[in-house]
Image (tube, rainbow, N blue to C red):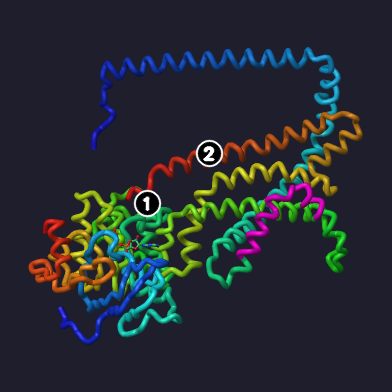
Amino acid sequence: MTEIDWNNPRLKVRGLRKNFDQRVVLGGVDLEIYPGQIVALIGSSGSGKSTLLRCINLIETISDGQIWLEGEDISVASINQDSVRREIGLVFQSFNLFAHLSILDNITLALRKVQGKTKAEAEEIAMNWLDRIGLADKANDYPDKLSGGQQQRTAIVRAVALNPKVLLLDEVTSALDPELVGEVLELIRDLKKTGTTIIMATHELSFARDVADWVVFLDQGVVAEEGEAAEFFAHPKNLRTHEFLSRLNI
Amino acid sequence: MLDNSQFEPSPAEQERRRIRVRAHRRSLLVSLTSTVVFAVVVWFGLTSTPGWSRVQASFFDWPTAEKALPLVLNGLLLNLRVLFFAAIGVLIFGLLLALMRTLRNPVFFPLRLFARVYVDFFRGLPLLIVLYLVGFGVPGLRLDGVGRISPELLGIAALVLTYSAYVAEVFRAGIEAIHPSQRLAARSLGLSYAQSMRYVVLPQAVRRVAPPLMNDFVSLQKDVGLISILGAVDAVRAAQIQVAMSANFTPYLVAGLLFVLLAIPSIRFADHITEKFAKREQVGNLL
Ligand SMILES: Nc1ncnc2c1ncn2[C@@H]1O[C@H](COP(=O)(O)OP(=O)(O)OP(=O)(O)O)[C@@H](O)[C@H]1O
Ligand SMILES: [Mg+2]
């Protein structure tokens, strides 16, 4: 693995606020992630994890603060949002795949229409990824023929195939039956080896401890504590973190 | 995989099947009998009315029907032509109206407002009045250089104006029924608004609205008969001429039956796709 350049974060967030009407959902969040890292975003339900990811993807209009992608401020009003989203992938908890397209077409759509690749090029890339996740034989099936875990893995490689600078995963396993969670986590572990930069909101704390480089604990819209994964789980300093972790029995 | 070919049903299942077959046969017999009884009662009721013989003579006269048929059929060709172009126009204009109504950017406010007013207006306006206004109003403008506009063309315009309003609403409902995360997923892959509409939302919306769309088509199919009031010699108009000449109403019946025959395939097809889509809706969205 190449040495991380600590002066140049892939993504940097400063003072990010998000209000819904009078409700403050994010109250000034700072965050950074360096190339090839995995940052785990944890916190109880409603703490603002999804909102943070959606703000970074520019799906939500932020109320204050700034976001830089490789040094470029993407929170300025004049930014071309579509071109930013081409660099930042986002996978949701569910309903990711396009129901009217085959698995193969799901993956090739953006490769062709956004990146302008030919059908043959796009299909080659897609088949490579499908091969890698063991779904090559399902290429021509429709999403409703796949198990939830297979659907989520397809959704993840669909985003990764576009080579995003940052991949955002929003609780990609929380809608799955327990026995399907493992295969999705295995894929994320595999992606880490290829150097994909990932911010993942997750409830899978033991997975976060194993795989994440950095853990950010979000509590009521602010970062209550963050740190290197091993250290964070072994010696949480904040009282709220203690409570959160002991409630989940980790 | 388990093989079903050597499956031997248990005695309990065999008994169940026997009983089901018997019950099925019995209900078939009951419905057959009641249908025959009903038909006989209606027939006697009708033929025993005092004016029956006169009605029969003026509505069910075979020689008049035979004479009118080729002319009415010829008129029906015009209806089909009008139907074809009107249907295409309605699909295009209806879709445009629906898309206008889904634009959220404030820049497009005028378009959105136009679509809204348009749809409200033409959904409320009787088709007959649209036909009169277009059919007699537009030629009244005496547009130079256009020459005389055929009643056929005016009829198509009137049908497109009215039916687009209905179809726009159908399309809009379809677009709005697509789960928002499908659009979000498309946008998060970097597809633009137009691209996510074109490749993700619309294909799914169109599938979903195919059944109500077919129903609108069926009703358009019979409403093309209304263009006869503009003087186009379509099936209805041809029948009217025959009625006037033979002093017998049978040609109307001939035209009516032809319209029904024309509609049956569409109606069956509409039912078929409704069923098919209902089935597809059951699966999917497993997550
Ligand atoms: N569009 C919205 N309008 C108003 N309030 C919202 C909206 N979206 C989110 N919220 C509120 O913001 C808060 C944070 O929501 P968010 O979905 O980010 O939490 P989360 O940490 O992802 O929770 P979970 O673990 O349940 O997914 C919640 O209290 C939610 O009610
Ligand atoms: Mg969430």
Judging from the image, mark 1 belongs to the subunit labelled A
Instruction: Look at mark 2 in the image and give the residue it sits on.
Output: B272
Q: Position of residue A78 (x, y in %)?
A: 45, 81
Given the image, on which type of amino acid does mark 1 rest?
A: Tyr
Q: Nearer the viewer, residue A87 or A101?
A: A87
Q: Which residue appears at 45% of the width and 60% of the height? A: B200
Q: Quadrant of residue B182?
A: bottom left
Left or right: B136, with A197 as reference point? right
- Residue A111 visible to an observer of this rendering: no
In the image, what residue occupies the spot 29% across and 53% down? Answer: A137
Disc 1: which residue: A142
* SS type, badge 1: loop
Task: Report the amino acid beneath label 2.
Answer: His
Segment tinted magenta in the rendering: B112-133
Quick one: SS at disc 2? helix
Cα separation, mark 2 vs mark 1, equals 22 Å
Residue A23: give x, y in percent of width and height: 37, 66
Q: Quadrant of ligand 2?
A: bottom left
The secondary structure that dominates the magenta segment is helix
Q: Position of residue B103 (x, y in %)?
A: 55, 65
Q: In the picture provided, is B47 more to the left or to the right than B98?
A: right
